[in-house]
Image: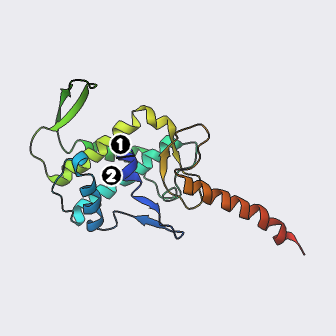
Amino acid sequence: MDLHPALELASTVHHDGHGGVADDLADAEGLTAWVRERAEWLGVSPFDADERARVEVVAVRQAVRAVFARAVSPGPASSADANRLLPADEAVARLNAAAARQPVTVSLEWPDEAEPSARLHPAGPADPVAALTATLARAAIDFLTGPQRERLRACAAPRCVRYFVKAHGRQEWCKPSCGNRARVARHYRRHRAPSENSP
């Protein structure tokens, strides 16, 4: 997985390549495919989503995108949902409620020649949807309480709706293609403006 899981969830809303916004979780089949691609990390295999699962995961994603908007403030939020964000306190409450849906225990894992790590284990049997939403909410909490939060940004490219972790001081875009699109738009604006003002 290249991105932090919370960024992956937030990035299921993205530019569609044609000036609009695409949603990878627009239907149950999309959620099923998304989860299956991440089955090992999510720990919910086999998984077949229904509409209830989709609605619950999208609710967690909505909360994640709202707290991401808070994290990048005073910078601009993603244009995909900047005008319809959950209030921050409601988003936090939603994440906490989802994280609590599946009780967990923690164990220390320390294999030879590796760094120690903590691993969460379900404390008992859980509904697969509760397990999925709890895992996603905990990933968001992990991200927001970790060092990457300070480098979180909303992509500044036209029509892009992604959040990304800034890798270096001058980075403004989530990927090179967004940088190219932003430079083309800036060039177009500069060269178009004088011709519009001519008699």
In this orientation, does residue 11 appear?
yes
The tally of labels here is 2
Task: Give whichever of discs 2 and 1 has the lower sequence position.
Answer: 2
Distance from disc 2 to disc 1, alpha carbons, whole Å, reads: 9 Å
98 with respect to 153 (left or right): left
Residue 112 in the image: above or below residue 14? above
Residue that sits furthest to the front in the current view: 113
Q: Which residue is mark 1?
A: 140
Q: Residue 3 in the image: x percent, y percent?
A: 39, 46
Q: Which residue is mark 2?
A: 60
Is disc 2 placed on a helix, strand or loop? helix
Q: Residue 99 in the image: x percent, y percent?
A: 26, 43
Quarter of the picture holding the C terminus: bottom right
Residue 74 in the image: above or below residue 51? above
Amino acid type at mark 2: Val
Residue drawn at (63%, 57%) of the image: 182
Q: Nearer the viewer, residue 89 or 153?
A: 153
Q: Nearer the viewer, mark 2 or mark 1?
A: 1
Amino acid type at mark 1: Ala
14 with respect to 117 (left or right): right
Q: Residue 160 in the image: x percent, y percent?
A: 53, 58
Residue that sits furthest to the left in the current view: 125
Q: Nearer the viewer, residue 39 or 160?
A: 39
Badge 2 vs badge 1, beta-carbon distance below 8 Å: yes
